[in-house]
Image: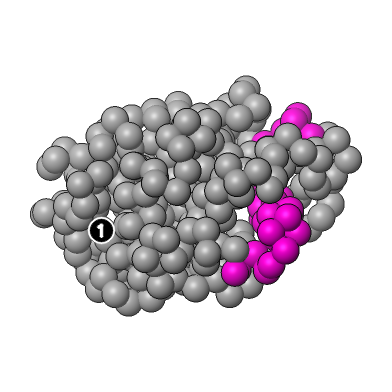
Amino acid sequence: MDALRQIDSWPSATAAVALVSAGGAVAAHGPQEQAFRWTSVTKLATALATLVAVEEGSVDLDQPAGPAGATLRHLLAHTAGYSFDEATVLAPPGTRRIYSNVGIEAAAAVVEEAAGMPFADYLRAAVLDPLGLRAELRGSPAHGLSGPVSDLALLGRELLVPTLVARETLDEATVVAFPGLSGVLPLFGRQEPCDWGLGFELRAGKSPHWTGTRNSPRTFGHFGGSGSFLWVDPEAGVALACLTDLDAGPWIREAWPALADAVLAEL
């Protein structure tokens, strides 16, 4: 696929991309088996593991969790009120969309306690091993995974055609939770509203956005500070995974939407 060759002109020294559909691999470019940091794309795997725990009955999305008045649902949707990287409460639960690593870590801690094992072990048993992923979680459940783009593409395929959770469960997690809340999308500024699912960032009507103008409003996924991203477009029926060795910065504002538009146009 010619569109994927756009990554060769990016300022990163090394980048890898992989496009998948429900049927499997569609196209790829760059080193598919080289391990990169996923940084905040880790949140997608952590959210999926939490959904597995919900279906197992060990946790409930509406059980109290985090600051007073908050639930596991609030934590996953970045509406518990926590600040970005500290357990400081900036707003009452459900009133603001504040992107928070602490909130995702708190959600993982709920699963960890219910499962009676370290979250890294639960993630391995619930998501990574069943999908055949070699990625390793070291440190935070919000940003600690590392692995190859081939793994990230397999996660994307799972989010297109779920096997670990019911379609209804994934659908609930990939529509807006707590509608109408404003917030800041890192590197893309304030969004009104700043729609988010349960651990999954939603394209919806956001502008500017890191996906392309050809992506449907139903597109969901996440990007990370290491120049990583995974978006899943249910209407196009594809997911695009990308890992790089260059931190995300102003360069992504043009590079990533242009890549998405070129991929969808070529399809």
Going by the image, does 81 lie left or right of 196? right
The residue lying toward the viewer, choosing from 52 and 32, is: 52
Rendered view: 138 above or below 243? below
Quick one: label 1, few (<14), some, or many (20+) residues within 10 Å?
many
Magenta residues span 93-121
Task: Identify the residue at image location x=77%, y=38%.
Answer: 63
At which x and y percent is residue 25? 20, 55
Confirm whether residue 203 shows in the render: no
Magenta stretch: includes residue 103: yes
Magenta stretch: includes residue 111: yes
Rendered view: 167 above or below 41? above
Rendered view: 220 above or below 178? below
Residue at disc 1, secondary structure? strand
Rendered view: 94 above or below 231? above
Going by the image, does 89 lie left or right of 35? right
Task: Identify the residue at image location x=85%, y=44%.
Answer: 67
At which x and y percent is residue 17? 27, 61
Specify the quadrant of the image occupied by residue 205. Answer: top left
At which x and y percent is residue 133? 39, 67
Q: Report which residue position mark 1 lands on.
A: 18
Type of amino acid at the residue the image marks with label 1: Ala
Going by the image, does 102 lie left or right of 172? right
Q: Residue furthest front?
A: 56
Confirm whether residue 126 shows in the render: yes
Task: Identify the residue at image location x=47%, y=43%.
Answer: 165
Image quadrant occupied by the C terminus:
top left
Task: Identify the residue at image location x=63%, y=72%.
Answer: 139
At which x and y percent is residue 264? 20, 40
Specify the quadrant of the image occupied by residue 181. Answer: top right
Magenta portion: prevailing SS class:
helix
